[in-house]
């Protein structure tokens, strides 16, 4: 990237503060400048991007669609910068580990098992943040749990859990619609929950030789939202048994049919090949890999 292609960092800093704090006034207060100076920096960034990242709504500012997408990466970059600064200032780099995780993995597996690791490693400070599944290039954590085929350039990937899918619904939904558990073909008459896109249910349709296309239904951004929608009885979701079977054991979910759908994607724990693991990072890698192996 040439110098002329690099975004104006002062403007990016102003944008990040506005997006994080919810307005120009709060951003100006934090950065020690005037609100008009913030507005000027936002205009410079819009001009550089050749599209607006914010727009006025009443007396305030809101992010445009492009602004929300840009803020995802900017937020991660600033979080990494602040974390690195804190590490150096506190002199505790060797004991801090940054782990990026997919929300569903954190909810269904990591936080349910993490106390064991913390008890065994009281000197390690674990910093957990989101892994952005649509843009792994922007993920700057020391370690990251990713979902895909295991091929990310420059990364060593340890397969930890299966990504196979199965149909799940809540006990309350099944009580209202008992027929859904009798024949896969009957699912075309009921509410489906779609995760990211509608391709998953189409593959499931093809596997069970269901005619036509899956009905449109609630479309959510990721597996964590799909899980919550299913728990709330909003319909039937394709979920990953390796993560959500714990909710079935608790009686909060029901698996409708035995066959699972494999789409070639699984869960992986990744780290940069060219960056040697610290002792603390190595401990976490070994613990996650071993713990996942025993939970399969």
Image (spheres, rainbow, N blue to C red):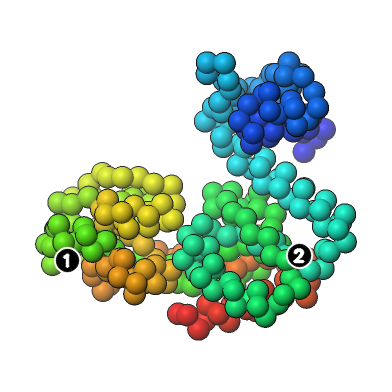
Q: Quadrant of the N terminus?
A: top right
User: How far apart are the alpha carbons under marks 1 and 2?
Assistant: 47 Å
Name the residue that disc number 1 marks.
181
Local crowd size for mark 1, using a 10 Å CA cut-off: few (<14), some (14–19), many (≥20): some
Total marks placed:
2
Q: Is residue 251 visible?
A: yes
Q: Find residue 24 and report its horizontal and vertical position in percent.
A: 67, 24
| Quadrant of res 15 | top right
Q: Is residue 272 or residue 114 the one in the foreground?
A: 114
Most foreground residue, 69 or 208? 69
Residue 37 located left or right of residue 269: right
- Which mark identifies residue 44? none
* Residue occupying image coordinates x 73% and y 50%: 80
Q: Is residue 155 visible?
A: no
Residue 78 in the image: state x and y as whole percent: 72, 44
**First in sequence: mark 1 or mark 2?**
2
Q: Nearer the viewer, mark 1 or mark 2?
A: 2
Residue 8 versus residue 234 in the image, above or below: above
Mark 1 vs 2: CB contact within 8 A: no
Residue under numbered circle 2? 96
What residue sits 53% from the left and 62% below the top? 106
């Amino acid at each position: 990237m040439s110098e002329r292609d690099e975004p104006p960092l002062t403007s990016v800093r102003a944008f990040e503060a506005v997006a994080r704090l919810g307005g120009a006034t709060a951003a100006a207060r934090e950065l020690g400048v005037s609100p008009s100076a913030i507005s000027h920096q936002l205009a410079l960034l819009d001009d550089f991007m050749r599209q607006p990242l914010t727009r006025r709504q009443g007396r305030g500012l809101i992010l445009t669609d492009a602004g929300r997408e840009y803020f995802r990466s900017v937020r991660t970059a600033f979080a990494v910068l602040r974390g690195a600064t804190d590490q150096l200032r506190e002199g505790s780099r060797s004991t801090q580990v940054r782990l990026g995780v997919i929300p569903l993995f954190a909810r269904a597996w990591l936080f349910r098992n993490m106390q064991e690791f913390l008890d065994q490693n009281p000197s390690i400070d674990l910093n957990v943040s989101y892994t952005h599944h649509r843009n792994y290039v922007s993920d700057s954590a020391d370690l990251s749990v990713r979902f895909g085929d295991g091929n990310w350039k420059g990364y060593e990937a340890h397969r930890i859990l299966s990504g196979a899918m199965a149909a799940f619904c809540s006990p309350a939904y099944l009580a209202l619609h008992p027929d859904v558990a009798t024949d896969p073909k009957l699912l075309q008459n009921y509410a489906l929950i779609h995760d990211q896109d509608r391709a998953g249910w189409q593959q499931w349709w093809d596997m069970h030789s269901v005619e036509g296309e899956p009905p449109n239904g609630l479309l959510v951004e990721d597996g964590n939202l799909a899980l919550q929608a299913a728990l709330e009885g909003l319909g039937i979701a394709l979920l990953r048994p390796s993560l959500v079977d714990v909710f079935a054991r608790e009686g909060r979910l029901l698996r409708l049919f035995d066959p699972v759908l494999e789409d070639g994607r699984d869960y992986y724990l990744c780290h940069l090949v060219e960056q040697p693991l610290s002792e603390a990072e190595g401990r976490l890698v070994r613990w996650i890999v071993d713990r996942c192996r025993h939970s399969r």
